[in-house]
Image: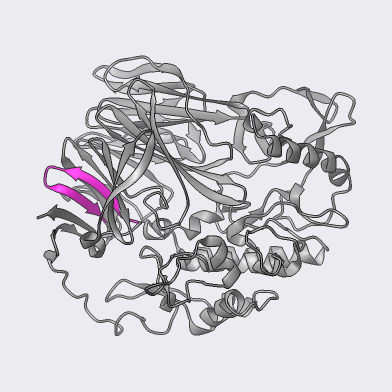
Amino acid sequence: MDIWLEGHKVALSPKQALGKGGEADVFDLGDGRALKVFKTPSHPDYAGLPHEQAAAKARLDEHQRKLRVFPSGLPGRVVTPQALATDARGQEVLGYAMRKLEGVEPLRRWGEPAFRRAGGCVGDGVTVLRGLHQTLGAVHASRVIVGDFNDLNVLVAGTDAYLIDADSFQFGAYRCAVFTERFLDPLRLPAGATALTPVQPASVDSDWFAFTVMVMQSLLGVGPYGGIHRPKAGGARLGSAPRMLQRVTVFHPEVQYPKPAFALASLPDDVLHHLHRVFVEDQRGAFPRPLLEGLRFQRCPGCGVEHARTSCPACQPHASAAATPVASVRGQVVATRKFSTRGVLVHACAEGGVARWLYHAEGLYRREDGRVVLESPLNPSLRWALCQEATLMGAGGQVTVFEPGRSPQVLGADVCEQRPVFAANARFHYWAAQGALWRNGLYGPERLGDVLEGQTRVFVGPRFGLGFHRAGGLRGAFLFDAERKGLRDGLTLPWPQGPWVDAEALFDGDAVWLFLAEESGGRTVHHCIVVGVDGAVRARGVADAGDGSWLGALRGKCAMGQALFCATDAGLVRVEARHGQLTAAREFPDTEPFVDSGSQLLLTREGLLVVGTRDLTALRMT
């Protein structure tokens, strides 16, 4: 497909890809702008999906008229079309050029408890929300409605929030036809609805409803319909759609509040009352700005809880922290604390059954033996990996290797999805740079093979590694031996169709468990694909994010033999592959006090190690 912009034909390659959405691919034009190209019905992402193909055709037909009359005068923090991309005759609109944003993260990151605990400043999050409040008010003053207002089409640079995907905005006769379930105003649903399919158009009120969801997620790490519905004996457990329709929120007494989230009591009463009025009592209208202006968070010097109250809701001000018992017993489970810090555990791994970790305390990053790696404030944007005594830090487009007795070594690295591409096992560290995958060798960097520059993600285990890319209509994967040079391209995997928002991989023996989070039909869906060292797909599983199952969270898992142990808020779950499907084979309710869905699990010589925010705890089944 030939694309013309401002009288010139545009040549696009996968190397220029910046991102992929459900409806378009985005490319870097190299002049401070990005080009959004709408997917046509023949796009590979829609292969075999007639409903999606029809929807793509309908969107393209509407864009022919809608984008030519796009409103002007919107706030500066709205990324609007600057020039239309067309066919050679200038008649068919194929996309548009827009301002390219640098160094951004989706607002969704502020809603992840792990981001806060790794140094994400809740005060900065409040500043972001105040600016977003002002921008949304100005959009409405221009007689425009966002429509599909969600935490992926709000990008944050520093503390400035920008609205993207403006082509789906609602104005004049043009309605917003897309929505995201977690931000859908239930008042848009018909009476007696059995599915989350809105019949009422988006409105100013539904935009403010979505904004209120973002406030709750950014401050508490949970949305109104988070947690798990656990009815009393004899009651039916409600899924996400019935809970929304019946307003069974986290305020409901039969909903188990998620363990990794921040306590409701950490917010002032007036903010909590407003959230209750909106999500339970169906109050609508603009979010009261004074509630945001009055928020001031502080950390309790006694227990460490971060809150926005006049005194700590968890203890008396300035009380000393209670001592945590070194060992605890619950039924057949013995939990023994192996390490504890008043700071934060930043990264942990297991090498040959030996646990290694990095923690931050009093302005210093330290390894498990206490030696200082780096003097720096806690920074959630840094990426880490450990390789024996070496500590790898990824920041921007480079990886820095810290080793005892040596000056830090800086490696240039490709950046994929706002993160440098690197990984490590017990022997080597690997990184992608200049269109190639590299490994540290005895005499310097060793080139393993070619990869797609700026578009490749890499994971590695003790025996082999896995890499994949997805750019425009191009997608693929490869395997590589952890010891030898060379890549085995052409790996065929059952890729999800929608845009990916996160990925993780776990290795054990001759298999890798690949986890992908996909945005699909307004929902976040988690996929697990088990791949053998020969490239064959052995099993698959799928679940909605946050559904309380073993796959409801993407992380918090440990591969062991042919099984997977998963941390949930209800305890550990053992998952096995049976006839190509992944099945929860056994639950361990006695482990419930010691794990949650935000825990990391490591297999060590001492047993299963639970990595929490501040503690390492070994679990032993008696």
Residue 453 on image: x %, y %: 52, 25
Left or right: where 81 falls relative to 331: right
In this figure, what is the number of numbered marks? 0
Residue 423 image point, x, y percent: 35, 33
Q: Is residue 510 above or below residue 343?
A: above
Q: What stretch of residues is rendered in magenta?
A: 598-611
Where's the N terminus, which quadrant?
top right
Left or right of 375 on screen, residue 166: right
Determine whether 502 is above or below 552 in the image.
Answer: above
Q: Is residue 554 magenta?
A: no
Q: Nearer the viewer, residue 453 or 202?
A: 202
- Which colour scheme appears in the figure? one colour
Q: Is residue 360 above or below residue 200?
A: above
Left or right relative to 322: residue 234: right
Q: Position of residue 544 (x, y in %)?
A: 49, 51
Q: Quadrant of residue 487?
A: top left
Provide residue 542's location: percent of width, then percent of height.
Answer: 46, 44
Quarter of the image where one finds residue 405:
top left
Which of the two residues, 198 or 353, is positioned nearer the viewer here? Answer: 198
Q: What residue is shown at x 40% (from left), y 46% (from top)?
A: 382
Figure quadrant of residue 547 = bottom left
For residue 107, above or below residue 537? below
The quadrant the C terminus occupies is bottom left
Q: Looking at the image, can residue 123 be seen? A: no
Q: Main secondary structure of the magenta part?
A: strand
Can see residue 415? yes
Q: Residue furthest front?
A: 234
Residue at 31% across, 59% down = 596
